[in-house]
Image (cartoon, grey):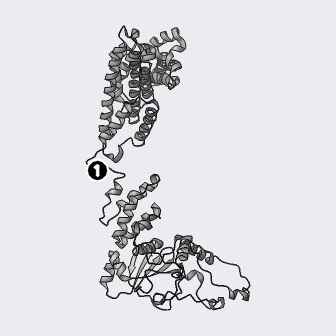
């Protein structure tokens, strides 16, 4: 994180910037807030900008007081609460031994105008005192990448007790009076972390910070071996809400990079399961809850949410704990259960005296048929998104008993089943599933006629039905078959279309393609073969 140099801070160095600091109830000087560092940086940038030559300032300016860095509101309140303890830190190296009553001397502008280096060559320096006045016996100098040089006057016993890093450095050299840390990435957070070593109620102080700032403190605390601070930061991160995916990623990434050996499981448990608790059963339970729900609004919204979440990660499930094959097997298990239930309901509804039974007997069965058909449509959407719906097409094509019962039920009870057939044809037409030729042929043979019987009702009584999309899917599915099968199916369709018109799917586009393949393309091919034969004959004559 930073290079460490053991040096001694000598006398006569460049003056260090005065910073207003107030004593906290814990007994240590507050480190400058981010505003102090930022304003100091802005001031330096402004001084570095080239200025046009101007006339010397009037002599009256000698009477002005030197400008100080603005004090944040929280520090002014602390100063007001303890006026006898607040002061300006002195910029010379004797400041630690000075009494608390000492006040900074005023410096005239004329004295400041003496020969000195250029402004851009001067580092931005801040001096900060920690602990009770008179207890300082060591200096820590932080050299930041942003150009700051911060001198911390601290108590060696406090640092050695709280930080394994400082304890090691102090044990290596007896009587060490100064440490210099070069290339600090985050000087501001280094200062705050050292201040936390003097804090009695660390939790209360951390509660005032944001998650992003706590993560910065956590990195510095780990570098310094400040174990109690690390644990307090982790306790904070475990309890505070994380806002947004980006913040969650930052927290998880930072915690996973910790090398200090502290317990981080409570934080990571928010985003991962125990190894023994694979979420396979949980996912199955969620799907079953949706499938068994009878509440229309909640069911509709949860179907949409679960489908969207599964679409976001089609290759693996959350935590990558369940393979795609296992997920597909689980979904197909639900499909078979729904199909068995649907077949049983169709058998009850196809009984001769079903229409004569009381409505309190008939209505639940009709409603249950619609529910199971909707369940199958939803499961089919999931499988299509996962590119694993070929087996569903096979299962549906083999439902000859269900298809034979279909015509015995009133349209109002059965049209939901035809929606499943329409969705399969759309999927095949788009290339979202690739069943074999025999399966495509069997699917059309089993379910195209029931779909055509219900088509008029689907167009006018089902708001979610897209007739144009289904017509295109049926036509494309037919055109994937051999030309003889295309002819058989399309001629059968033509007979129905000429009788019922708009009550039948409009497959004219597929019919045109089949016509060209049958009557036009062979003529072109024959013509091409004749031309080829003529060219061969002419070449032989020239020889």
Quadrant of res 224: bottom left
Q: Position of residue 477 (x, y in %)?
A: 43, 23
Q: Is residue 126 visible?
A: yes
Q: Residues within 10 Å of mark 1 (few under 14, many from 20)?
A: few
Q: Position of residue 495 (x, y in %)?
A: 48, 9
**At x 41% / y 75%, what residue is drawn?**
194
The quarter of the picture where the C terminus appears is: top left
- Answer above or below: position of 23 versus 439: below
Q: Is residue 481 visible?
A: no
Q: Residue furthest left?
A: 276
- Answer above or below: position of 268 versus 369: below
**At x 46% / y 73%, what residue is drawn?**
187
State the SS at label 1: loop
Quadrant of res 58: bottom right
The quarter of the picture where the N terminus appears is: bottom left
- Answer above or below: position of 336 versus 155: above
Q: Position of residue 99 (x, y in %)?
A: 48, 89
Q: Residue under label 1, please give it.
A: 274
How many numbered discs sit on the rendered protein?
A: 1
**At x 54% / y 86%, what residue is drawn?**
15
Q: Position of residue 451 (x, y in %)?
A: 44, 17
């Amino acid at each position: 994180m930073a290079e460490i140099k053991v040096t001694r801070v000598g006398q006569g160095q460049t003056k260090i910037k005065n910073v207003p600091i107030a004593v906290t109830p814990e007994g240590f000087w507050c480190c400058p807030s981010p505003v102090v560092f930022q304003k100091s940086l802005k001031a330096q940038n402004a001084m570095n900008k080239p200025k046009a030559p101007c006339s010397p300032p009037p002599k009256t300016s000698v009477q002005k007081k030197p400008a100080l860095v603005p004090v944040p509101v929280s520090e002014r309140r602390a100063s007001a609460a303890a006026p006898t303890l607040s002061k300006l830190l002195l910029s010379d190296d004797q400041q630690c031994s000075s009494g608390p009553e000492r006040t900074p001397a005023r410096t005239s502008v004329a004295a400041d105008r003496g020969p000195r280096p250029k402004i851009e060559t001067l580092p931005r320096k801040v001096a900060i005192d920690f602990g009770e006045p008179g207890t300082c016996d060591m200096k820590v100098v932080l050299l930041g990448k942003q150009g700051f040089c911060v001198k911390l006057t601290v108590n060696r016993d406090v640092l050695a007790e709280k930080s394994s890093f400082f304890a090691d450095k102090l044990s290596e050299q007896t009587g060490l009076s100064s440490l210099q840390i070069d290339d600090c990435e985050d000087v501001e957070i280094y200062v705050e972390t050292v201040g936390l070593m003097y804090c009695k109620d660390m939790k209360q102080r951390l509660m005032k910070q944001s998650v992003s700032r706590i993560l910065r403190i956590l990195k510095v605390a780990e570098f310094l071996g400040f174990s109690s601070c690390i644990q307090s930061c982790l306790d904070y991160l475990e309890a505070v809400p994380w806002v947004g995916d980006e913040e969650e990623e930052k927290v998880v990434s930072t915690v996973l990079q910790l090398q200090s050996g502290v317990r981080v499981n409570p934080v990571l448990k928010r985003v991962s399961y125990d190894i023994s608790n694979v979420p396979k059963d949980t996912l199955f339970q969620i799907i079953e809850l949706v499938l068994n729900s009878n509440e229309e609004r909640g069911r509709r919204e949860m179907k949409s949410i679960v489908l969207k979440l599964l679409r976001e990660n089609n290759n693996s499930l959350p935590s990558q704990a369940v393979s795609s094959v296992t997920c597909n097997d689980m979904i197909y298990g639900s499909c078979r259960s729904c199909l068995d239930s649907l077949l049983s309901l169709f058998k009850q509804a196809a009984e001769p005296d079903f229409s004569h039974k009381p409505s309190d007997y008939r209505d639940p069965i009709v409603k249950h048929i619609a529910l199971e058909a909707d369940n199958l449509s939803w499961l089919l959407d999931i499988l299509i998104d996962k590119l694993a719906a070929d087996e569903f097409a096979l299962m549906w094509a083999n439902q000859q008993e269900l298809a034979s019962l279909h015509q015995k039920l009133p349209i109002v009870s059965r049209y939901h089943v035809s929606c499943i057939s329409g969705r399969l044809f759309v999927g095949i037409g788009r290339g979202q599933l690739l069943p074999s030729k025999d399966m495509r042929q069997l699917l059309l043979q089993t379910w195209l006629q029931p779909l055509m019987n219900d088509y008029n009702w689907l167009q006018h009584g089902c708001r979610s039905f897209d007739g144009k999309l289904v017509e295109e899917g049926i036509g494309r599915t037919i055109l994937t078959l051999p030309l003889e099968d295309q002819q058989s199916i399309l001629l059968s369709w033509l007979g129905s279309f000429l009788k019922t018109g708009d009550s039948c799917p409009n497959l004219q586009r597929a019919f045109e393609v089949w016509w060209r393949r049958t009557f036009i393309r062979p003529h072109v091919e024959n013509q091409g073969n004749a031309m080829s034969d003529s060219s061969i004959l002419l070449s032989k004559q020239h020889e």
